[in-house]
Image (cartoon, rainbow, N blue to C red):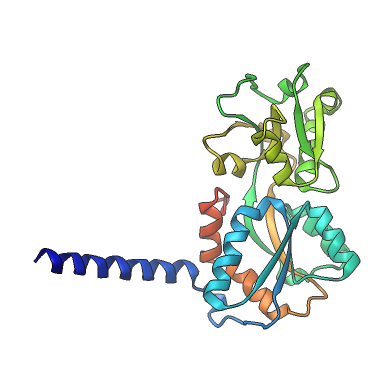
Amino acid sequence: MRRSAAIVFSLAVAAATGILSWVFLRPSPATASPVVSRKPIMVFAGAASKPALEQCARLYQQRTGQKIETTFAGSGTVLAQVVQEHIGDLYIPGSNDYMDRAEQKGAVIPRTRRVLAYLVPAILVAEGNPKNIRGLADLARPGLRVVIGQKGAVCLGDAAEDILKKAGLLEKVRPRIVSYAMSCEDVQNALLMGEADVIIGWDSMARQHPKKIDLIPIPKKYLVAVYNIPGAVITWSKNKAAAEVFLNWLTGPSGRWIFKRHGYTVSLK
């Protein structure tokens, strides 16, 4: 009897696992018949989406057989590469303003634009907040090492400077900035590696590293915009159909579940 019960239990677990895999890996209703191309889908993305997008690419490839190639860097850096070299199938920057720039340059197809997730700028410090940072004004304290993104190269740099400027603190904080990072990942790593006492990062970073990073909210009155991670098909893509199907999957139930699992906000409701 025990052996039979164990077999039944094992079969039940296997069935449940299969059902969950199908639920989370299946295409969304809009992409019920995946378009699979022999050519890889080339994705150029801001590093803000890297943790979730890498997993999405792996799982989608396993599910459909469609190869996905990802390139991550600052949103402005990858946009410049896409425009200068006329390459790529999907552009996924770390914020909506860089997608606006891509549209202005004619680099993406506006009707394909979708939102994958939302990001909220925040003050991030090491676990336990050893420097006792309480708000934006503290970033101007003598002896503090501050790291932000490079404005124009990475969306987090634009956001940080806009926030500090709106708070009237940019020139006071500037002498404390020890580095301008070229990607969101580099901003985060500066804190994780002890090269910064405080950074202006994304809220998702703290949720991805709950035992290493503490979050101090930035008052809403200083947040210049609602930031999101958008995606769109690149104008000169030679793989448009397959790229749009993948993008629809990313913004459907499966992709959003993966982004949420990695600490991103997927809905503002």
84 vs 172, nearest the viewer: 84
Residue 91 in the image: state x and y as whole percent: 75, 64
Above or below: residue 39 compared with residue 53: below
Query: Furthest residue to the top?
Result: 142
Q: Is residue 141 left or right of residue 32?
A: right
Query: Furthest residue to the right?
Result: 84
Residue 140 in the image: state x and y as whole percent: 78, 21
Q: Is residue 148 left or right of residue 114?
A: right
Query: Furthest residue to the left?
Result: 1
Query: Furthest residue to the front?
Result: 3
Residue located at (79% from left, 76% from top): 237
Residue located at (76% from left, 33% from top): 147
Please indicate, yes or no, whether residue 251 appears anywhere in the rendered image: no
Above or below: residue 222 compared with residue 229: above
| Count of all numbered marks drawn on residues in the image | 0
Residue 44 in the image: state x and y as whole percent: 75, 63
Residue located at (60% from left, 44% from top): 204
Above or below: residue 72 compared with residue 145: below
Q: In this view, does 102 lie to the left or right of 241?
A: right
Quarter of the figure with residue 52: bottom right
Above or below: residue 189 compared with residue 196: below
Residue located at (76% from left, 41% from top): 159
Tell me the quarter of the image containing the N terminus: bottom left
Please indicate, yes or no, whether residue 52 appears anywhere in the rendered image: yes
Residue 15 in the image: state x and y as whole percent: 31, 71
